[in-house]
Every structure is written in C-alpha cells, then in structure tokens.
Image: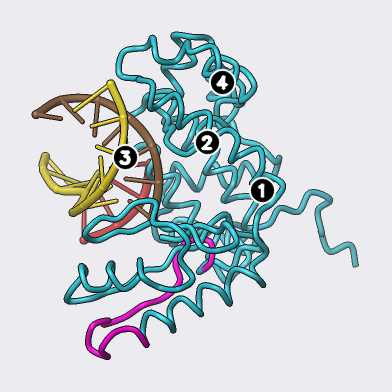
Chain colours: A cyan, B yellow, C brown, D red
Amino acid sequence: MMNAKPTHTFTNHDVAEHLRLIATLKEIKGEGRFHWLAFRNAADVIDNLPEDVNDIAAAGTLTDLPGVGKGVAEVIEQFLATGDSELAGKLRSQVPVTLVELTEVPGLGAKKVARLWRELGITTLAELKAAAEAHRIRELKGFGAKTEENILKGVALLEQRRHARTPLGVARPQALGLIQALREALPADAITAIEPAGSLRRWKETVGDLDILAITPDPAQVMAAFQQLPQVEEVLLGGETKTRVRLHGGLECD
DNA sequence: AGGCGGTACTG
DNA sequence: CAGTACC
DNA sequence: GCCT
C-alpha cells in the first residue's frame, strides 16, 4: 500500500512555530494588535492540541478549532503542504526575519525592535550589541541609559541561555517543590489554586524559566511568602500580584 | 457590528 | 503622564 | 484576525 506518508511531515509544533513567526513579523511591521495576536493564540492552540493537526487538516475541520478561522486555516494548509505560506513569504519580503531574535531579548518588544531597525539599521544580535556598547541606543528618543544596559544584559543572557536551557526533568521538580513549599508556608485557604504555567505546563523539553500561577483571595500574602522561600536567591521584581525571583542555580521564576 | 486583560517598568 | 513590554 |  502506497498510503501517502509524505516526505515532508510537519508536527503540530512546527505549525505553531510558523504561526508565531507570522505573528511576530506582523507585529514588527506595525499591524494592529489583534491581527497578529490571533496568530499567536492559534499557535498556542495548535501547540497544545492532543490530535495531529495533519489529520484535522485532512478532514477539513481546521476552522472548528478555537482561534482558527479562515485566514489561519489557509496558512496552516499551505504550511503542511509546502513547509511555508504565502503570508509568511510576503512578510519576509517586508521585514528582515533576523529581527525576530531581537524580539527575544528581554525588554525588547516589536515596537522597539522596529525602531532600532528603521532608525539605526540594526537587524542582528551582533549589531544590537555593538550599538549598545557604542552608546548609540541612548540617542534614540524614548530609549535611555537604563534601557541600553538592559539590552546589554539581555543579549548576554540570550547568548548564554541559548545553549543552556533547563531540561524539563530538572525544571519541573523544582517548580513542584516551590508549589509545595508555598502551600506549606501558608494557611490552607490562602491559596485557592496553584499550578505550573508557561512552557512547564506545555511540557516543553526545555524551559527558559519557571512560571507558576496561583489563585488567591490575598495576593500580597502569597507574594510575600513566595519571596521568602528558601529556594529564592534574589527578588528581581516584587509587585502586588506578580513577582519574579532568581532561584539558587540561576533559574528565574514568576 | 463590536469586542478583544491587567500590571509594572522606563523615560 | 504616556509608551512599552510581559505574564 | 477570531468570536459572539
């Protein structure tokens, strides 16, 4: 039986990444929020799908998926068949794809990346680093010395982290440990619900940081307890409803 | 046709 | 305060 | 863009 097992078989994750690429390029291009957000949402849906997106496409029921309408479905079909899409192609001709990695520098979003590109001609991490070191960034309106420092830190972090992501097998037990510790540190009714989020929740093979989500009647109490856990090395940011810390070992956690 | 979250940091 | 970035 |  020649039952068609195409040479180009793409996983749900491949599709999701393609949709994310489109979303980011659209965002850099300056399209309105909801245009690109739709693609990012759809990407998350596909990424978490238990079924194979190839089967769904074959059945012609892509648009039954939440967040997948005519536009996204079209892109998915093209991608599954060719490994690319017209939309992505058009976007690539308008925006350098290398800008996408700049977007991964913490503190840099699409807006800033777009300006760095148009106003300073920066398209790569190396160029970004050079410009920051030469203090060319702070010349831009809305950018300051602090932003420049953060960019330098961010680039360094990215260069390291790129080759040092944490395996799920290490990260998950740590997260579960934090959750348990938090529960034990507080009265039972202080936390309505608490669970891993982000890449942890999506069972990605490696994670860049830990995300934990808690539902509580008293956020301040939980934030305080979180910051005082023994696992915490340094509080990077402490808000009323959100806290970011660095754990012993370097892993960061929200 | 109309809606599409909320907070924290920077300048 | 406005603009931006992130969860 | 997608959903209601």
Q: Is residue A29 above or below residue D4?
A: above
Q: Secondary structure at mark 1?
A: helix
Q: CA distance from mark 1 to mark 4?
A: 34 Å
Which amino acid type corresponds to the residue marked 1 in the rendered image?
Leu
| Residue A154, label in figure | 2
The answer to the question of whether label 4 and label 3 lie on touching residues, with beta carbons closer than 8 A, is no
The disc at residue A34 is: 3
Check the residue under mark 4 and report the chain it is in. A
Q: Earlier in the sequence, mark 2 or mark 1?
A: 1
Along the polypeptide, which appears first: circle 3 or circle 1? Answer: 3
Residue at image coords 27%, 73%: A222
> Can you tell which mark lies on residue A128?
4
Q: Amino acid at mark 4?
A: Leu
Q: Position of residue A14 (x, y in %)?
A: 65, 50
Among numbered discs 2 and 4, the one appearing first in the sequence: 4
> What amino acid type should be assigned to the residue bearing mark 2?
Gly
From the top left corner, tell me how far across and down residue A224 is, in percent: 27, 68
Q: Residue at x 40, y 24 (%)?
A: A112
Residues tagged by mark 2 and mark 3 found on one chain of the structure: yes
- Which part of the image, by quadrant, shows the C terminus of chain A? bottom left
- Within the image, what quadrant is residue A125 found in? top right
